[in-house]
Image (spheres, grey):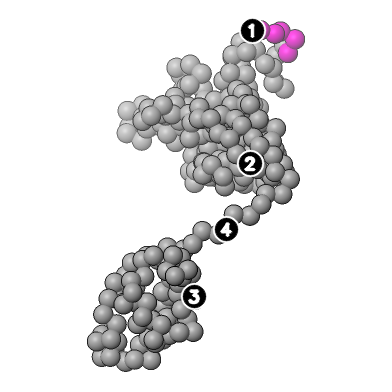
C-alpha cells in the first residue's frame, strides 16, 4: 500500500505484471519510473510474443511520464524568516542565513531571469534593484533584504507592455546571447534614477553639485554601466538603447540601417 501511494499512476495489472517478471527492479521502477534498460530486460526475459500477450497495458506505462516523489523536506540550517516584496508581490519564507538573494530568487522563488555568472560580484549578470538601488544579488544576503522591495527583470514589464528600457534594448539590438541582458537592463533602469537624482559618477564634471540632474553622455553611460560585462561585445548598442530612453533623439537605430532607410 505504501508503494501504491508513491506511484499512483501504476495500475494493478501493470504492477502485477512487473512484480511477476522483474521483482528485483520494482523498487527502482516505483521511485524513478520505467527506464529503457527495464524495457530491454522485459524483452530479454519474455520475448516479444509473450510480452505482447502477457503485458497488456505496459506499453501505455512506457509511453507516459512517471512522477518522481519529491525529496523529503530537510531542516534549514541557521534558518531565518525573511519577509519582503518581490516584483510587487509579498513573499515570506525561511532561508539559510547565509543564502544569497540571487539563490533565493532563482531556487526558492523560481525567478530565473537574474543570472549567476561569476558569483563573485564582477560580471553584473545578477544585478537586481532593491529599494530603487541596483545591487549585485550574488553578494547580497537574502536576510538583509527583509522589509525591502526587490525588482528583477521579470518585474519591469506591465503585463504585456515592455518597460521602455526592455523595448529599447530590442530596438537597438542590445544583446546577442542574452545571458547578461537581465542584469544589463536592471542596471540601466536604476542608473536613470541615479542620473535624475544628480548622483555623480567618476566622469561627472562637477561632482559637488547636488540635486541637479546629470545628462547622460556616452561617457557617463559607459562609466555607470562598467560593472556589467558583455562577453558578446554589444556595448555600443547597449549605450544607444540607454541614450534613447534618456531622451537623446539623435541615436541611430540599427533597424534603419538594416532596411536601408537611414
Residue 236, label in figure: none
Earlier sequence position, callout 1 versus callout 2: 2
Q: Secondary structure at mark 2?
A: strand
Marks 4 & 3, CB-CB < 8 Å contact = no
Residue 208 magenta-drawn? yes
Residue wearing tag 4 = 72
Disc nearer the start of the sequence (1/4) = 4
**Chain-order first, disc 4 or disc 3:** 3
Which labelled disc corresponds to residue 212? 1
Looking at the image, is 224 positioned above or below residue 59? above
Are the residues flagged by discs 1 and 4 in contact, CB closer than 8 Å? no
What residue is rendered at 44% in x and 36% in y? 173
Q: Image quarter for residue 20?
A: bottom left
Image position, residue 155 (x, y; %): 48, 31
Q: Quick check: 28 left or right of 261?
A: right
| Mark pair 1, 2: CA separation | 42 Å
| Left or right of residue 173, residue 207 in this image | right
Question: Disc 3 on helix, strand or loop?
Answer: helix
* C-alpha span from label 3 to label 2: 33 Å
Residue located 32% across and 32% down the image: 260
Instruction: Name the residue nearer the viewer: 241 or 146.
Output: 146
> How far is disc 1 from disc 4 in space, using C-alphas?
56 Å
Which span is picked out in magenta?
A: 207-211
Q: Is residue 252 visible?
A: no
Q: CA distance from mark 4 to mark 2?
A: 16 Å
- Tell me the CA gap for discs 4 and 3: 17 Å
Residue matched to label 2: 94
- Residue bearing mark 3: 28
Amino acid at each position: 500500500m505504501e508503494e501504491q501511494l508513491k506511484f499512483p499512476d501504476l495500475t494493478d495489472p501493470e504492477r502485477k505484471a512487473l512484480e511477476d517478471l522483474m521483482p528485483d527492479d520494482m523498487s527502482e521502477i516505483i521511485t524513478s519510473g520505467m527506464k529503457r534498460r527495464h524495457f530491454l530486460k522485459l524483452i530479454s526475459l519474455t520475448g516479444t510474443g509473450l510480452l505482447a500477450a502477457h503485458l497488456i497495458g505496459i506499453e501505455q506505462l512506457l509511453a507516459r511520464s512517471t512522477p518522481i516523489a519529491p525529496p523529503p523536506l530537510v531542516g534549514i540550517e541557521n534558518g531565518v524568516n525573511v519577509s519582503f516584496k518581490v516584483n510587487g508581490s509579498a513573499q515570506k519564507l525561511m532561508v539559510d542565513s547565509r543564502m544569497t538573494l540571487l539563490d533565493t530568487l532563482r531556487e526558492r522563488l523560481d525567478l530565473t531571469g537574474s543570472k549567476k555568472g561569476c558569483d563573485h560580484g564582477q560580471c553584473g549578470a545578477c544585478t537586481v534593484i532593491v529599494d530603487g538601488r541596483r545591487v549585485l544579488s550574488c553578494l547580497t544576503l537574502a536576510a538583509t533584504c527583509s522589509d525591502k522591495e526587490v525588482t528583477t527583470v521579470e518585474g519591469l514589464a506591465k503585463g504585456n507592455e515592455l518597460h521602455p528600457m526592455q523595448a529599447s534594448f530590442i530596438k537597438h539590438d542590445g544583446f546577442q546571447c542574452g545571458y547578461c541582458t537581465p542584469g544589463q537592463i536592471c542596471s540601466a533602469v536604476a542608473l536613470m534614477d541615479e542620473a535624475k537624482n544628480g548622483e555623480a559618477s567618476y566622469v561627472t564634471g562637477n561632482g559637488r553639485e547636488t540635486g541637479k540632474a546629470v545628462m547622460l553622455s556616452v561617457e557617463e553611460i559607459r562609466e555607470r554601466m562598467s560593472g556589467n560585462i558583455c562577453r558578446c561585445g554589444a556595448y555600443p548598442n547597449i549605450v544607444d538603447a540607454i541614450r534613447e530612453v534618456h531622451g537623446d533623439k539623435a541615436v541611430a537605430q540599427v533597424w534603419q540601417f538594416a532596411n536601408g532607410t537611414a
